[in-house]
Image (tube, rainbow, N blue to C red):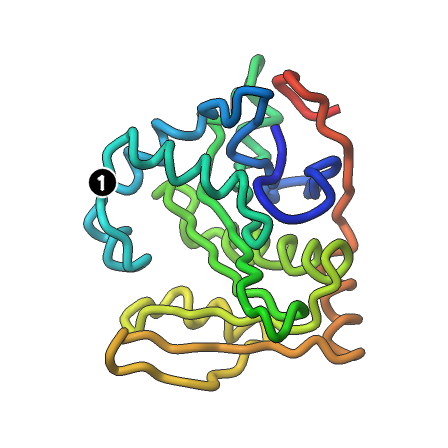
């Protein structure tokens, strides 16, 4: 499976060693368009949660609407979407599947036409057993590293609901600074500019990362 949307065709993906998230794309594609990935039903069940809807400012969707949205994201060049997997589950299951190891997702939006070096990052750890264990922080670091090294990004923004204290604390821990508050949308905007010092810090934080090709149709990393 591949990373959806932007980037170099999903030819490689970051893998963390040890008990760290593994990033995988949500969909594959064929000559007939998008194929429905195994992540769809699990993701749909997650988003029935009123708490997740509140934290992510999302509306409940039907399964068909979920698939349609994922297919549109697969085709959009200004969006990168990866599923976050629990690497420990992946490594300990005899025959692991993406769906059984899913923890959440992480996204990059490249929608600022005037500044192609700016990416808006979103992280959601939806699996209850994976919350509060550093999955969100690790997923954000891996995605930021991907954005800097593969997409040439130099700035990141995160828009977070004012009541989402865990996410606010996480991005503050990642050196993001508050730059705006919207009372209309009830969200706070944080930004991080990747100075030389910040790039060095990010490199140190992701020194354990390996990028490996993912074979089409395979059920495990190679």
* Farthest-out residue, left: 50
Q: Quadrant of the C terminus?
A: top right
Under circle 1, the secondary element is loop
Give the residue at mark 1: 48
Residue 27: x %, y % from top left: 52, 30
59 or 85, which is in the foreground? 59
| Residue at screen point 44% across, 29% down | 39
| Residue at screen point 45% across, 24% down | 36
Other residues around mark 1 within 10 Å, as few (<14) / some (14–19) / many (≥20): some
Q: Quadrant of the N terminus?
A: top right
Residue 156: x %, y % from top left: 59, 70
In the displayed structure image, the side of residue 186 where residue 214 appears, left or right: right
How many numbered marks are there?
1
Rendered position, 133 above or below 201 = above
In the displayed structure image, the side of residue 131 where residue 199 appears, left or right: right
Which corner quadrant of the image does residue 17 belong to? top right
């Amino acid at each position: 499976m591949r990373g959806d949307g932007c980037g170099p065709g999903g030819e490689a993906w970051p893998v963390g060693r040890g008990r760290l998230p593994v990033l995988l794309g949500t969909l594959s594609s064929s000559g007939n368009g998008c194929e429905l990935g195994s992540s769809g039903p699990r993701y749909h069940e997650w988003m029935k949660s009123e708490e997740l809807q509140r934290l992510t400012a999302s509306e409940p969707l039907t399964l068909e609407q979920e698939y349609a949205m994922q297919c549109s994201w697969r085709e959009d060049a200004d969006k990168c979407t990866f599923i976050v997997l629990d690497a420990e589950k992946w490594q300990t299951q005899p025959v692991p599947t993406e769906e059984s190891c899913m923890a959440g997702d992480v996204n990059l939006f490249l929608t600022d036409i005037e500044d192609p070096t700016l990416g808006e990052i979103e992280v959601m750890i939806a699996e209850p057993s994976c919350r509060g264990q550093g999955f969100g922080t690790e997923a954000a670091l891996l995605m930021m590293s991907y954005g800097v090294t593969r997409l040439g990004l130099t700035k990141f923004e995160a828009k977070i609901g004012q009541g989402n204290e865990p996410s606010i604390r996480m991005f503050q821990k990642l050196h993001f600074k508050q730059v705006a508050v919207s009372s209309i949308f009830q969200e706070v905007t944080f930004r991080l500019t990747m100075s030389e010092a910040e790039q060095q810090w990010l490199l140190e934080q992701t020194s354990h990362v390996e990028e490996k090709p993912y074979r089409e149709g395979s059920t495990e990393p190679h």
